[in-house]
Image (cartoon, rainbow, N blue to C red):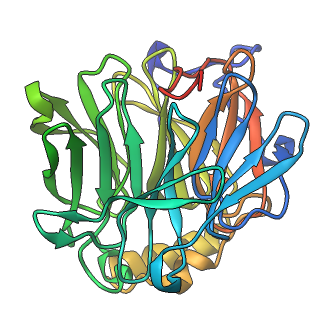
Amino acid sequence: MKTQGSAYLSAADGRPFAVSPAALRWKGAGLARPECVLATADGDLYTADWRGGVAHIRPGGSQTLYAGGLPGGRPLRPNGIALRRNGAFLLADLGETRGGVFELGRDGSVGPFLEQVDGVELPPSNFVAEERLGRIWVTVSTRLDPRTQAHRADIADGFIVLKDQRGARIVADHLGYANEAHVSPDGEWLYVNETFGRRLTRFRIAAGGFLGGRETVTEFGKGTFPDGLAFDAGGGVWITSIVSNRVIRVAPDGSQQLILEDVDEAHVDWCERAFLGGVMGRAHMDACGGRFLKNISSLAFGGADMRTAYLGCLQGDSIASFESPIAGHPPVHWRY
């Protein structure tokens, strides 16, 4: 993975910045699949939690679980989450066969926010994000059931939904496993990770939320399956990779800098062979090969100076963190 010219981040000694997994710090305990992590200016952390809601980790370390259920006893399986101005949360439900977006109150109340588009029930839903204009963006990774059928380079049936004052509609389709998506700090672009397309993609946002032509920002190689993304103050995009437990910064010129990895090469080789052979399944995803990290899936900048990077994950029960030489860009919920 190359660093090019002045695009890379440097450490105090002038060498390219990198983090040793052994130097990570940890917050929270007993979390259940904290796939998505959010940070606020007050020092609070919020994570998706498969006990049915959102775990709140306060600066002092105390924790509260805000949890609820769906009608008929169907479990709520939050994947991506968004914090709203009123203190409630939007949850992208990654159910076994059904999805949608639900609003969770801190009293445990759960209500439907988006369950259908064009009269069709949403499949298991990956991510939800609210932007500064109040529009809601939702990703669905695949229409296939089970989802593991889409863990292939030749499947591209993921899509993006926009919900605004005009209603909900599909604004982008044929994505290679659409994952975390966010509007860029300048409001001009929608960025999305295509996990099994192994690329970071962006669309220019036109009037009315319509998306323009699709652009590939960068493509990833062996062992990198991009999941989460976050923006920094220098115009970079930070990517987390499942399977290889990598954090990669993509500079504005598209060059990549490896910031962190906690990888078992034999495990990556096994997953890579399965992926290229079109047989990558649940077992490959669940067999995490890292010594410290457990399939990292998201990144949020926090701390007083926004230089602490927090890592969500699929299989751990706590949140790892490290200090960055560059601050993150404040997300829409930063002051909520």
Q: Is residue 213 above or below residue 175?
A: above
Q: Relative to the observer, which residue lies in front, 85 or 181?
A: 85
Res 17 → quadrant: top right
Res. 259 in view: no
Quadrant containing the C terminus is top right
Residue 221 in percent (x, y) is at 40, 54
> Which sits in the foreground, 231 or 40?
40
Q: Is residue 204 left or right of residue 149?
A: left
Label count reads 0
> Residue at left 36%, top 71%?
99
Residue 273 lies left or right of residue 284; in this view the side is: left
Image coordinates of residue 163 in percent, x first then y, are: 23, 45
Residue 51 visible in the picture = yes
- Which of 65/281 is in front? 65
Q: Residue at x 48, y 54 (%)?
A: 80
Q: Left or right of 145: which side holds 263? A: right
Residue 52 lies, with reference to residue 66, above or below; the image says: below
In the rendered view, tell whether residue 66 sits above or below residue 50. above
Closer to us: 255 or 210: 210
Q: From the top left corner, tell me how far across and down residue 39 is, in percent.
A: 65, 34
Residue 38 pos. (x, y %): 61, 40
In the image, taking residue 64 as reference, residue 137 lies left or right, namely left
| Image height of 172 relative to 125, above or below | above
Location of residue 243 (image quadrant): bottom right
